[in-house]
Amino acid sequence: MNIFFCGGIPKSGTTLLQRILDLHPDVGCSSEENINFIANNFIKLHADYNQKLLIRAKRIGSENCPLINQDVFIKSLFDLLKEIAIDRNKGKKFFGISDNHFLPSNINSLLSYFNKSKIILIFRNPIDTALSTWDHNHRLYKDEKFEKHLDLLKVDNDLNIEKYVIQRSKIWNEDVNKIFNQINKNKDDILIIRYEDLCNNKTDLVLKIFTFLGASIDQNIITNIVQNSSLKSMKVNSPNPNFFSKGRINFGYGDLPNNIIKEVLEICEEGMGLLSMKLPKI
């Protein structure tokens, strides 16, 4: 089967990528999955089941109680992911799973298990990624009145946007390095794209994405995808238009002082270099 995975660091344009993929008539890529939820429950189930085996063996005085290897549960997890992809994308030639948490940490495992699968990863500059997360959590707090949304933004118990951007940028740089340590082993099966390029040169990048997957690049299909994945179009067609906000790609200019922008660019110089992101002049 033609299975692929897509995602990236949250608030990097992963939703835009997922919508673009799902707009293709031969490609199914439903809304984001929560693989970590399933994986954590599989890990717990494995530990709990082995504990039950030990308790039962002790009760009956058994001298031999072989425990279940974790690989058995991992294989079952991946089998389930395959069935989820098929079930959510019935009738499609290419089956996609969109995920921003499990995928970046398990690239090699997924490519090893799913023979001939492919991965598309999207990245966005660290400052606008952090600002987008800041805005998103504030919107969630406004809508849901759940204090945890704001707690996640606090640094040293302080709700300060400059401190938050600096902290998140340090994490961003670490995450990019971790991801690239995995990517180097499977370069041919992974496509790296930048959110900024998707905004500035969408048609060419959409062509590149579907060529990578092996899907049709008929001109009418590509034109339709480009038109229907605009920010305006997605807002109009969404039951939650407030989710689609500014789509920043300006490295925080106009939102943050220049000294904070400069500090973040220095922190993230290595990660941005791995992504061949051009450093703006300050």
Image (tube, rainbow, N blue to C red):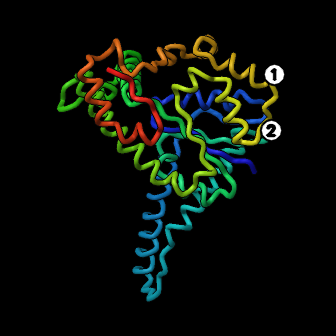
Left-right relation of 261 to 126: left
Could you tell me which residue is drawn at 46 percent across and 48 percent down?
Answer: 179
Label 1: element kind: helix
What residue is shown with label 2? 91
Q: Is residue 280 above or below residue 54?
A: above
Left-right relation of 18 to 164: right
Left-right relation of 80 to 139: right
Q: Is residue 205 above or below residue 49?
A: above
**Toward the viewer: 226 or 103?**
226
Q: Name which residue type carries label 2.
A: Gly
What residue is shown with label 1? 220
Q: Can residue 144 be seen in the rendering of this structure?
A: no
Q: Position of residue 66 (x, y in %)?
A: 49, 80
**Toward the viewer: 105 or 191?**
191
**Toward the viewer: 253 or 22?**
253
Q: Position of residue 228 (x, y in %)?
A: 68, 17
Q: Which label sits in the foreground, 1 or 2?
A: 1
